[in-house]
Image (cartoon, coloured by chain):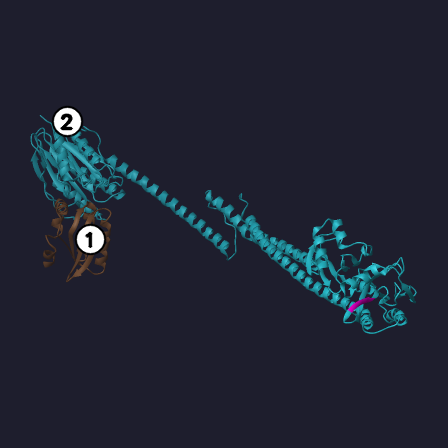
Chain colours: A cyan, B brown
Amino acid sequence: MRNRGLGFKLILFTLSGTTAVFLSAFLYFYMSAKDVVKRYVVRAAQHLTHATAYQIESMLRGVEKVPTNYAALLSAGNYEAEDIATLPERMVSANPEIYGAAVAFEPGAMTAGNHYFAPYCYRKADGCLANVMLGHESYHYFTMDWYQIPKELNRAAWTEPYYDEGGGNMIMASYSVPFYKERQGEKRFQGVVGTDIALFGLQEIVSSIRLYKSGYAFLISRNGVFITHPDSSLIMTNSIFSIADEENSSLLRSIGKDMIRGGEQMVALQSGLLLTSKCLLYYAPLSSIGWSLGIVVSEDELYESVHQLGRAVILIGLSGVFLMTIIVMVIARHITKPLKDLSATTVEIARGNLNAALPDIHRDDEIGILARSFEEMRLALKEYIKNLTATTAAKERIESELKIARNIQMSFLPKAFPPLPGKKSMEIAARLEPAREIGGDLYDYSLIDRNHLFFAVGDVSDKGIPAALFMAVTKTLLKGIAETGMDPSEILRRCNVELCGENDSMMFVTVFCAILDLRTGRLKYSNAGHEHPIIIRRGALPEYLQVPDGFFLGVEEESRYQTMETQLRPGDKLIVYTDGVTEAMNAAGELYSHANLMKTILSCSSLSVEEIAAEILGSVKQYSSGVSQADDITVLAVSLTGT
Amino acid sequence: MELNGYKQEKYFIVKAGGRMDAISAPEFEKSCLEWIQQGETALVVDLGGLEYMSSAGLRSILVVGKKLKSIGGSLSFSSLTPNVAHVFSISSFGTLFPVYDTLEKALGN
């Protein structure tokens, strides 16, 4: 799914979920409701059918009693023809349901010689009774159903319903009961008491059955012929089988067969001639007469209430879903709007604009917390950057100050090698490699007069600008005092007194200073806590120069110093250095040490002072490569060349 | 640099080990001055574990020494390693402060 935003996803999933749940619930309810209704209808139809069947059968049973009783009488007693003749009228007049009654005898059974004897009484259209004698050539009643069937079956029987053409075009059915004469222990068939029953009472019962709007009941005879049906055109003209043929429905055909057989059940039918819509048919038998009663109900009408309910529920559901959509949209918006604002601002901040103000979100939930945290972070970031900027600026200032200090330092050091024009009797070389944080090393040399070279090397105890300034002061003092022609020890003593004067910070400086008489080669020197210089006498190995003890300059005002002397011969070299050389560290944390220095000097002792100084410096640098320089490195080499 | 101080009889012993250079010397100076502030006046600094001392270390020692001198206290050293002894001799610190071979000897005084 493309990036459609939180809101969209929220709405989509919430709605899908709730709609799915609602639909499943609804479908379940709908199916269940239909099922319940159907079962109810089956029960109701069952009851109705049974009740109606019972009603019809009661009625028929009542009717059956009349001929049955008369037949019993006739079987029992003796009778004359005149008595018999009156019987039909009696039957008809006493029983309104009986439309016609006859007592028909076997040929010659009543009176010998009489082929036919069948008095018959019937109701006319006007209600009067008429008596006739049945039986002549055109009415051979012996073969008629109403006579023959009871005779053959030896029991009472109903005929198929028929239209009475003679009477008022009613549907009739005849019920005939056989009677017998017992002679010599043998029962002999005598005749039949037949009654014609008009079925319209029955029809009324059945047609009054109405179910919902279009539901109805119908009766079919033993042969499946419709006895009653709301569509009167079907009555007596069609049977359930003819309809089945018309619809080409084998289902209907088998139903018909089952109905005639006396079956009972509920079936579902498609729309057809029975009903114009899908329907349910319940049928049950009227066993005594061999007919079947069917009740048809339209499914749609049946489920109408369920459908109505369903429609209402769907409507409620849809409006509910719609309402939910609105609510979810509102909520989603409630969540995503501040998030959108927040994310827009954070994009801005991420670009580097720390001044982008975060939207004002006064909420106590996660979004509010997020917004507030973000704001705090923004401010903290701003503060941090401000501090960083200030620190960096300060650092840069210090860097530049260090540069200045270095420049001060370097500017004070004489650089000219060979420095001294016209003096070929000695050579001097010096190297000073300042550390990053100025270590305060110093060296100096100058001719204090035509024949005397003054040189000194010193190391201030502190680092940075204070050291550089102290170094400058010391150097100036040394030179100034040296120029007055004093001995080295006196130079140191006086310098010390000056330095001690205003030295609250307890800075001290080590110094080795010497004065070389260029004519004689006599070297006078003094030491204030400085590293012992190394002397290479011509033809001999390098060794440490013996120096007098002397305390650092700048600490004890009363410090005393001594001057020592030694004789330099042409070819002799003196190397003065600071502890930046011997205390240079390599990557393993080991010091260059005096041993290495001696070794290096040994290897280049025959070279010129310039080369020796360069060699020592190169060796130290190589040794400590990779490690940042901790202290200033100073080497000063003097050699007497002279004649 | 490892640094601890503890009282023993009338002396306050400061044990320093490792390296005393421009990075660790200020810590030494600060701690000693604090102890002095707390009332200690007779400090014995045992450098038995100290392998290296730079000029920054010497400076810190001077500051402490000067402070003690100003209040009439004393500062002495013991158990110097060869490296540190060399530094002390060059700088003539030995003439300014008493140096002993062992802590016992320092305390004996």
Percent from the top left, x then y, of residue A477? 19, 40
Rounded to the nearest angstrom, the CA distance separating label 2 from label 1 is: 48 Å
Percent from the top left, x then y, of residue B108? 9, 59
Secondary element at image label 1: helix
Front one among A79 and A458: A79
The residue drawn where x is 42% and y is 48% is: A381
Q: Please report the bounds of the magenta region as a residue range.
A: A187-192
On screen, residue A628 versus residue A15, left or right, reads left
Chain letter belonging to callout 1: B
The residue drawn where x is 9% and y is 38% is: A545
Tell me the residue that label 2 is attached to: A423
Front one among A642 and A378: A378
Residue type (three-letter) at the residue carrying disc 1: Val
Percent from the top left, x then y, of residue A527? 13, 41
Tell me the residue that label 1 is attached to: B64
The residue drawn where x is 19% and y is 29% is: A417
Q: Residues within 10 Å of mark 2 (few under 14, many from 20)?
A: some
Q: Quadrant of residue A80?
A: bottom right
Q: Quadrant of residue A541?
A: top left
